[in-house]
Every structure is written in structure tokens, then in C-alpha cells.
Image (tube, helix red, strand yellow):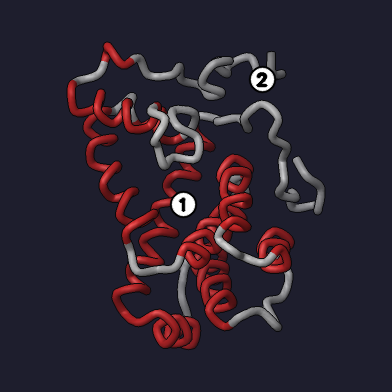
Amino acid sequence: MPDFPTDIDPDSGSRLPLPRRDDLPAAAQAIFDQLAGPSSRSLVGLYGPGGLRLHSPQLAAIAQPLNRYLRWETDLPGAVREIAILVTARAHDCQFEWAQHEPAALAEGVAPATVEAIRSGGPVDGLDETEAAVIALGRELFETHRLSAATFARAQAVFGTRNLVDLVSLMGMYAATAALLAAFDVQLRPGQQARLPNRKGQTE
């Protein structure tokens, strides 16, 4: 058994149990089946934010199509989406989010050096302009809670208005997910290790 804190359910890895399909209304049962089924596009199925949201079935029903659009259906390339998610995870010290999306980013062709720059908070000099623009936008937005005119203009020049709206919305969605994961103390899955350094440079 994993060595979880005492308030963590061993099956869900969080402070809430896994949702029970029979307890859900029909619309939420369909979401349950999407998450739990063999063709699910979710990286973690019911373990994590998808399972947590099913404890509020109406929220799950609203969130699912938004998640699907921002994660899979925008015009943003997969590598850009994964970089945006990693920047968000890093800004929120979200070990769970990072652990799922670092492999996804590498699978989308994001260079290990780019992943390491995000993880370490290092400079983005020498990175592709598109990658650098995403990282600069996310860092400034989450660190200062503002976006300077120069950073905005750079991102808009790279992505255009529609894609920039989608990009910021994607980051906002994963920031909300990071809050959900933190509040319910979702643990890394068995076999996963913490990959983000804490503020002293050590992995937690």
C-alpha cells in the first residue's frame, strides 16, 4: 500500500473516495464511463481531477466539454498546449499535474531542454520563439498577476487573438485544476516520483 497521509483514501489517492457510478445521475454516468473506459483520452482516468469533479455532477457536466475543447480541439499545436500546462503546473508547484504532463510534453516533441527550463525556472534564451513566448506569458501572468504590454504584444504576434484567448484559457483551466488537486491533496500515483523542486531547490 502507498504511504499516504492518514486522511487520504487509498483507492482515490485523495481526501475524497472514488465516485460510485451507481450514485451518479445519467449524464454524470456517461462522463464516468468516458473517464474509466479503455478509450479514455484522460491521462489518469478517475484518479485525479476527473474523479473529483464527479462529486459535483453538474460541475462535471459543464467542465467536460470545456476541458475537451481546450485540451484537444483548439488550433494550438500539441507541444504548445503541453508547454502551457507545464508552465502552469510549475507556477503552482503542482507535482501531480507535472507528473502527468511531462511525459505528454516529451511525446508531443517538446525538447528535454525546454522542459528543464520550465522546471528550473531557468532562462529561455535560445528556445524557439513560440516556446519562449508561452513560457514568458505564463511566468509573468502567474508571478505578477498582470501581463505587461510588451509580453502581451509578443504573445499576440506569435499566436493571434483567437489562439491567445484559447492559450490563456487553457492555462486558467489548469490553474483551477491545480487548486482542486491541492485542496483535496491528490497524491502521485504509485510508482511516480516528485519531479518539481521546492523553493529551496529540492524535490518534495
The residue beneath circle 2 is 4
Q: Is residue 161 left or right of residue 146?
A: left
Q: Percent from the top left, x then y, of residue 124?
A: 67, 77
The answer to whether residue 33 is above or below residue 21 is below
The answer to whether residue 202 is above or below residue 79 is above
Q: Is residue 152 left or right of residue 108?
A: left
Q: Which mark is residue 25?
A: none
Name the secondary structure under disc 2: loop
* Residue type highlighted by circle 1: Ala
Quarter of the rendering occupied by the N terminus: top right
Going by the picture, which residue comes out furthest to the left? Answer: 26
* Residue type highlighted by circle 2: Phe
The residue beneath circle 1 is 175
Quarter of the rendering occupied by the C terminus: top right
Q: Residue at x 63, y 32 (%)?
A: 188
The answer to whether residue 157 is above or below residue 111 is below
Q: Residue at x 66, y 79 (%)?
A: 127
Callouts 2 and 1 close, C-beta under 8 Å: no
Quarter of the view holding residue 155: bottom left
Q: Residue at x 38, y 28 (%)?
A: 37
